[in-house]
Structures are given as C-alpha cells and as structure tokens.
Amino acid sequence: MLGVGDVAKPVIASAITTVLAFSPMFALGGMPGKFAWALPVVVVLALVLSLVESFLILPAHMSNGHDREPPPATTNGAELSESSQEPRAARPEGAEPPIAGPEKRRFMVALERGYRALLTRALRRRGLVLLVFAAVFVLVMGVIGPRMGFTLFPQDDSDALFIEVDMPVGTPIEQTEAAVAAVEAQLPALIGDDLQAVTARIGHREAMAVDRKTGAAAHEAVISAMFVPLGREHSSAEWAQILDRELAIPTGASLAFTAKTIGPPLGSPVTLHVAGNDDEARRAMAEAAAQWLRSQPGVVDVAVDERPGIPRIELDLDHDKLALRGLDVATVGRTLTAAFHGLEVSEIRELDQSTRIRVQLDANARGALDDLLELPLRSQTGERTLLRDVVHPVEVRAVSRILHRDGLRTATVTASFAPGAKLDANAMAARIEAELLPGLQDPAVRARVGGEATETAKTTGDMKGAMIIAVLGIVTVIALIFGSFLEALFIVTVIPFGAAGVFLAFFLHDKPLSMFAMLGIIGLSGVVVNAAIVMVDGINGRIAAAREQDPDGEGDQQAMIDAVVERLRPILVTTTTTAGGVLPTAYGLGGYDAVLSPMSLALGWGLIFATLITLFLV
C-alpha cells in the first residue's frame, strides 16, 4: 500500500489531465462532431475503470507471492548501511548509484549510463539545448506548418467506385440498359484482380441511394464497382482516371466517376451553391463557375446538379388577339385540356353500372407541335380561330429536378481533386472566394461555398476555444496538485512540442492533416503530459529527500539526475508499447484504414518526439 500511496498523486493527476485533453472533442461541430462523439466518452470510461483497477485490484494481485527484501534506503545519493543506517560518503556529481533491488539487464544498465551522461552534459549546456529545441519548434510550426494541407476525412482507402451513366434526354430505358451492359462488360478485363463485384441501377444516378426502389429518368444509370479490401493495385481515385482513359464509351453516353466517400457525408471537396429564382441567371452563373473550375490544374469531375430534362413548349398568349376574337385564357386552357386529357361528354347507365365517356384527341393528332397549333378555338359568338393565331410557341430548356436551399432554387457545382494534386478543400474555397466570386455578380443570384470547406469550419470553429479552455484546465489541475504554476507551465510545454513532432512526421510522410490526425494530437497531449507529471513528481520527491540532508540545496542537481534516470525505464516502456501498438496501424500492416491510420501516425511519432522533450527539456 505504500507503493500505491507514492504514485497516487501523479496517477490521479494524469487521469484528470487526460480527461481534460479529450474534452475538446465534445465541442466538435457539424456532421464530424456527430461521427466522433463516442471517442471521448469511451476514453473517459476507460480511464475511470483503469483507476479502479490500478488502486483496488492490481495491488492485491501484485502482493501475492512477492515477499522481497526492501532495497537499501538512500539519501541524497548516499547508500545507508543495513546495520547503522548512517549515510555513506555521498557520490560525486555524475557518478552512478549502486543498483538496488532486482538485478537489471545489461542493456538497461548501459542505456541508463548513456542517458545519465547525456543528461549531465545537457544540464551543463542548458541554454544551448533550449535554443536548439526552440529553433526546431519555430522551423516546424513557422515554415512547415503553414504548408500542411488539411482534409477532414482522407479518401485514400475508398473501396468502391461509382460510374454515373447519362444518355441523351428521352432515351428509352432499353437503350440505357444496353449502354450500361456495354460498360459493365469491360470492367473485369480493365480492373483485373482489384475488382470484387459490379452492380448497376437504371432509372437514376444517385450513387449512394442503395435502397431506392424506383427511378425518375430512363436515360440515367449508375454502375457500382466494388474493390477487394486489401492488396489493391490502385486506389479508387486512380482507377477513376484509368477507366476514364481506357473505357470504350457507348454512343451517346457520357460517364462521370465518383469514389465512395469514407466517413460521414460532407459534400464534395469543392462545392459552390448558386441560388436564385431567375432560372437563366442561375444556370449562367453555375456554368461559368463550372468552366472556371475545369480550367484549374488538379480539379476533376466538375459537375452541375441541375440535370437536363425533356424540353418543354411554352405557349405565350397574345392577349390583344384573344380580345379581338372574343376569346379568353380559360377557353384556351379548356381546349388544351380536352386535347391531352379529354373531356367527359356523356355517361351510359345500365342497371346499377355506369360508364363515363371521355373524348380526347388521338395520340397521333397531338404528337407534333404543328398538329397541336391547328386546334380550333370557338368564341362566345361561335367564331372559330386556330390556336396558332393567338399564341407564340417557345421551346424552354427544362431540368429533371430543381433543388431548393433556403427557399431559393439552387444549382450546386461540385468537383474533386486528382490523385496526387496538392490541393485541399480549404485552400480551394479561399481561392474561389478571392478569384471566382468577385467576377460572378448578379443581383438576382447569390453564390456561396459549401461542402467539405463549410463542414471543416463548423468542426474546427468551436474546437479552438475548447482546446484553450482544456489547456488552462490542465494547467490548473497540475498547479493544484504540485502547488506550483511554474511547474505546471513546464509540464504543458510538451504539448506544443508534441504537436510540432506530428506536423514534422506528416510533412515527411507527405500526408495532409485530417480530423482524426487532430484528434490524435489531442489524445497525444494527454499522454505526454502524463509522462511529464510522473517525471516532475519523481524529481520533487528526490529533491525533497536531498534537502533533508543538505538544506543548502547543493545536491539538488544530482538528486534531479537520479530521479530522471530512475523514471527512464517506465517512460521508455510507456513510449515503446504505445508507439509499437499504434504505428503498425499507421503504416497499414495488416490493412490500411484511411480514418484511423492518420490518428495512429500522430500518436506514434508525436509521442516519440514528445518523449525526447520530456527526457531532456522538462
């Protein structure tokens, strides 16, 4: 129980600071916040249960079968004799203490000797050491950090590709089905062993509407190509480029390729909403934005969601001619209704059954515009006038659907990035607002950026303030436990250095930061603070014991070195086991995961970098 009491303070402090480190995750906004809320909940529950196990269960297990002689007591680096308990001669600065307790392995002894020598030299040149670490921090955060891209959810590991097939408007469904079959037949030979399965749905091209039972357009279809989960030759984005280049496209068809999205629905990397009830102005602005995006290097799959429908004919009435001939709008409407839908003119009754008689034009008589314009209109005076004499037919471009946003008709322009393109949603959104939108000015239409860039802003907006509050909370907890705000500040300095290590690791691996990488940095802050807390607690205990023998404090530095060397093994064990547990996931050993691998990479390399800070700077 004495051992439990000795470590109770740092262990409890470590648990509280870890909970505070993960608390900013509760402030995640937008769809990613709904996706990741379970992570901090699980961490908090695990910490609570681990404290119960550490203080109530583990000591009972460790006490069984462990009846060992206590190691000789020491004071200020001087070993006490078993008989007199009087201190022997104190060791000179830098000398190694005798090994107490169970015999250490040669590797650990050699490691501690080397670390003791390095630490002694670092303390003698503490100004130079501090300058070197500060220079590395400024270099990473000031030069490398601004160049890092950010993607909420990397799509490197997408395991499916959707091929949207679009035939000319009015194409019979049989022709669409034949075009889809022609594309499907080419996929096994082109994709090879990477292909796992192929499915197709005809009547719409909404790739993610897997439960949709009916279609809305006979000229649309979507083909889903599913890839094997492991050992793929190419990613989904790379296969999209290959198929776009190699597929023999059926006559009249156009193809668009979209990789399956990993993570919650965020919208496309590039999304621009063009809203306005003026159809022509809205379409013109959306098309201008699409043309600008097509001209940007690295931007692919540019599309506008206003899909063309069957063109319609609008009959503009000449009200002056209607008035001259004694006609009105209602008469024209009734005539057209009778031509297409018919009018009930009679009813035949036979006993208890009745049959209504409807009269309408034959389909051949209303299949052409010229035939329709020959319809006669009868005025109130009985005079007959042809429809073509009082209307002006106008062909109007139609769309298969019109979406609304904030009560306005909206066309959405979307695009993706080519594999290997050094682009991200935030940078492209900034370019759109700076370069594109100033040239798209129309009082009837408004345009604004959406999609992944907007979700990123929602996710990180509230998180920054929450992280500041969490760091202040960590400082307060450590200060209350150790009774010194200065020591608390020393301990939390490992957090920015750990973040710098993550930035450097991602830069060297040529990977963008992501939401889960940022969550890895948050989790890392709790882990590295824990190591620093254990280190500082050991240093304080050794210095306090040394001051009892030497109130002048001349042996403080030697006591500090002894304490740090004593904590070397548990710190290295923690770092090695944690890094060894997460780095295989980071590098995809046994299977790569585009969501969890960035978090593992941040935890692994950030912990390694922060351990160096803990061992030499704290």
Image (tube, rainbow, N blue to C red):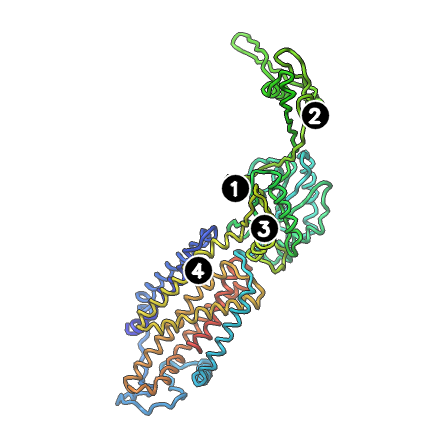
Front label number (3 vs 4): 3
Amino acid at the residue labelled 4: Lys
Q: CA distance from mark 3 to mark 4?
A: 28 Å
Residue 408 at x, y = what percent? 53, 39
Residue 579 at x, y = what percent? 48, 68
- Along the line of sight, the residue nearer the viewer: 240 or 131: 131
Label 1 environment density (alpha carbons within 10 Å; few <14, some 14–19, many ≥20):
few
Circles 4 and 1: CB distance less than 8 Å?
A: no
The image shows a total of numbered marks equal to 4
Q: Tell which circle, 3 or 4, labels the residue nearer the N-terminal end.
A: 3
- Please state, as top left, top right, bottom left or bottom right, where the N terminus lies in the image: bottom left
Please report the residue visible at 65 percent of the width from the left and 16 percent of the height from the top: 325
Label 4: which residue? 464
Label 1: which residue? 405
Q: CA distance from mark 3 to mark 1?
A: 19 Å
Q: Tell which circle, 4 or 1, labels the residue nearer the N-terminal end.
A: 1
Q: Tell which circle, 2 or 4, labels the residue nearer the N-terminal end.
A: 2
Please report the residue visible at 49 percent of the width from the left and 54 percent of the height from the top: 457
Q: Tell which circle, 3 or 2, labels the residue nearer the N-terminal end.
A: 2
Q: CA distance from mark 2 to mark 1?
A: 36 Å
Circles 2 and 4: CB distance less than 8 Å?
A: no
Q: CA distance from mark 3 to mark 2?
A: 42 Å
Q: Is residue 176 above or below residue 388?
A: below
Q: CA distance from mark 4 to mark 1?
A: 29 Å
Residue 35 at x, y = what percent? 46, 52
Residue 109 appears in the picture as rendered: no
Amino acid at the residue labelled 1: Arg
Q: Tell which circle, 3 or 1, labels the residue nearer the N-terminal end.
A: 1
Amino acid at the residue labelled 3: Leu
Amino acid at the residue labelled 2: Leu
Label 3: which residue? 437
